[in-house]
Amino acid sequence: MLNMTDLNECFNQAIRECSRYIAVRVKVGFNKEEVIINPFENFVEKQVYYNRVYNDRLQHMFSDEPILITGYAHGDSFSQLELDLDIISIQ
């Protein structure tokens, strides 16, 4: 099961490896999932944000509708992120 510790490790690894992007797959309400892609320059701010707004089970703590992080990956290209997050299966 995904958790905040693993998400933080993804960010830390991406920073160590100087990956160009981190992608976070999010399920909002009962709609299809969406993918948010952050560039390297935003990694530190986004990591702080996710830790402040999501609980250990990666559920948004302040939204009126359910929001859940369902996957994350880091890499140097969008196509790599698509493969790592298995984007094709969520379309």
Image: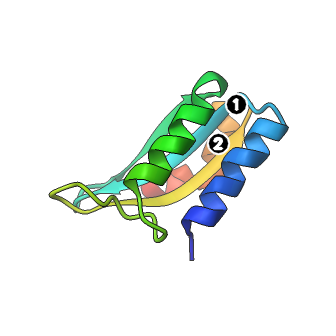
Across and down, in percent, residue 7 comes to 61, 57
Q: Nearer the viewer, residue 87 or 74?
A: 74
**Which image quadrant is residue 47 in?**
top right
Q: Residue at x 65, y 49 (%)?
A: 73
In the displayed structure, 61 sits above or below 77; it is: below
Q: How is the image coloured?
A: rainbow
In the displayed structure, 58 sits above or below 17; it is: below
Please indicate whether residue 81 sits to the left or right of residue 67 in the image. right
Q: Nearer the viewer, residue 17 or 78?
A: 17
The CA distance from mark 2 to mark 1 is 7 Å
What amino acid is at disc 2?
Answer: Leu
Whether residues under marks 2 and 1 lie with C-beta atoms below 8 angstroms apart, the answer is yes
Q: Secondary structure at mark 1?
A: loop
Asked whether residue 91 appears in the rendered view, the answer is no
Instruction: Identify the residue under disc 2.
Output: 81
Instruction: Identify the residue under disc 1.
Output: 77
Across and down, in percent, residue 20 comes to 71, 28
What amino acid is at disc 1?
Answer: Ser
